[in-house]
Amino acid sequence: MNDNNRGILIPFAVILALGFIIGAVIIGNTWKNVSRGNVTITVTGSAQKEIRSDLATWNATFSNEGGDMQETYAMLQISNNKVKDYLVSKGFPADKLVFSSINTTVLHPKNAQGYATDEVSGYRLSQDVSLESNDVDKVDLLSREVTELINQDVEISSNPPQFFYTKLSDLKVEMIGLASKDAKTRAEQIANSTDNEIGEVRSSRMGVIQINAKNSTDISDYGMNDVSSLDKTITAVVSVSFSIE
């Protein structure tokens, strides 16, 4: 090869090499951008809020027992009036009290072997009373004091009241929003620690809502809905995936 041809090929080889290098850089950056665009980060956000019940329900059963049906019925009517007067005295309107139909149980004596016989020894009549009120503290107090009726010869059994939060639907929407905001904050913190930024939301999944008695840590895969406590804690959890930029 003469000197003239060699002089032409050297610059050409340099240009070709630079072309390969530039192409490799462009391809590398493009692949990097494509790869990063496909990377996601998934975080779980949560939100908690203390709530107080705004509706309470309560019910109890009172009864009388006697040897004659009519006499027992008359005694139950007296008990009914005492229960009604007592509840009205505690601030519950008479027209808000609900009395059930009367339940009748026929009593049979037992033989020497402990089995009930066909003979009728008496009757037991019982009736339920229930109410609901937005005055949750009053209902809570009633459930603990209603056994005072025993002093009036009323055989009564009080069930624990149930407490509800009636604005739960709107609150759930708010809690999901707060949990999603918490998820975004967590994702940003993780991305920033690696000199990256989060992009668009790729997917999101809402967990179950947990409504527990205040300070309770109980959880369930199907969600909790405590009705035994006046004061509750609602917890929402959201899992969100973000792209990385």
Image: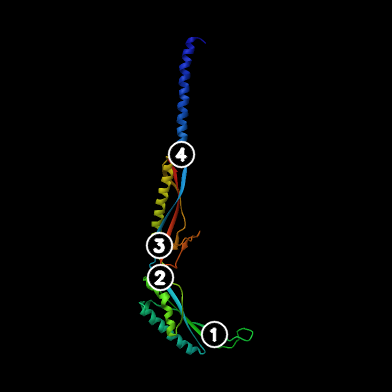
Q: Amino acid at mark 1?
A: Val
The residue identified by callout 2 is 56
Q: Secondary structure at mark 4?
A: helix
Q: Earlier in the sequence, mark 3 or mark 1?
A: 1
Residue 60 in sight from this viewpoint: yes
**Badge nearest the viewer, 2 or 3:** 2
Mark number displayed over residue 36: 4
Q: Position of residue 156 (x, y in %)?
A: 46, 80
The residue identified by callout 3 is 168
Neighbourhood count class around disc 4 (C-alpha, 10 Å): few under 14, some 14–19, many 20 upward:
some
Q: Residue at x 43, y 86 (%)?
A: 78
Q: Earlier in the sequence, mark 1 or mark 4?
A: 4
Q: Position of residue 232 (x, y in %)?
A: 42, 63
Q: Amino acid at mark 2?
A: Ala
The residue identified by callout 1 is 106
Neighbourhood count class around disc 1 (C-alpha, 10 Å): few under 14, some 14–19, many 20 upward:
some
